[in-house]
Image (cartoon, grey):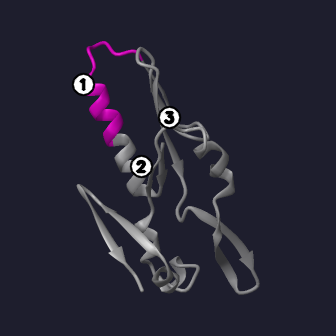
Amino acid sequence: MYVGDSLSLNMWQSMACMLHSSLPQPANISYHRDAPTPNVTFLDYGVTLYLYHSTNLVDIVREKKGRVLKLESIDQDGAALWKTMDVLIFNTWHWWTHTGTSQPSDPLSFLFQFRIVFMDPPYYIHQEFI
C-alpha cells in the first residue's frame, strides 16, 4: 500500500505500470480507480497495490485558531487498513515543507525533537535533528 499525497499517487501508478508491463499478455488485471481506496489487482498472482491518500499521515482537527495537526495521533481512518497490509510505503514530505495558508501548523518546528528518515529516491538520507 502506498500512503501519502500526490507523490505517492505517482509512485503507485508507476509501480502498477511496471508490474503490468512485466507480465505475459494478456494480463488478468482488476483496476478500481474510483474505489474509496484505489487499487489494482494482478489476479493471476494474488497481488494488489493500494493507494491511500493522506496528506500528512496524522489526524487534523478544526479548532478556533484553524486546522491543527495532531502529531500524537496517526490518521485514524487509515490506521485500521494499514495494519492489514504486508508492505507500507509512506511519502508525505512535500506537504510538511509548505508555509502560509497551505500549512496548518508551525512549519517544521516539531521535527527537531525526533529522528527523521527522509525518503529521497533512489536512496535514503538519515539525518539526526537535535
**Local secondary structure at mark 3:** strand
**Of the pair 113 and 63, the residue shown nearer to us:** 113
Residue name at image x 26 percent, y 14 percent: 24
Q: Which residue is mark 1?
A: 22
Residue density around tag 3, few if under 14, some if 14–19, many if 20 or more, within 10 Å: many
Q: Residues within 10 Å of mark 2 (few under 14, many from 20)?
A: some
Query: Label 2 amino acid?
Result: Leu
Dots 2, 3 in contact, CB < 8 A: no
Q: Is residue 15 left or right of residue 65?
A: left
Mark 3 / mark 1, whichever is N-terminal: 1
Residue 27, magenta (yes or no)? yes
Give the magenta part as a residue range.
14-28
Checking the image for residue 39, the label placed there is: 3
Q: Identify residue type, mark 3.
A: Asn
* C-alpha span from label 1 to label 2: 20 Å
How many discs mark residues in the rendered view?
A: 3
Amino acid type for the residue under numbered disc 1: Ser
Viewer-proximal residue among 109 and 39? 109
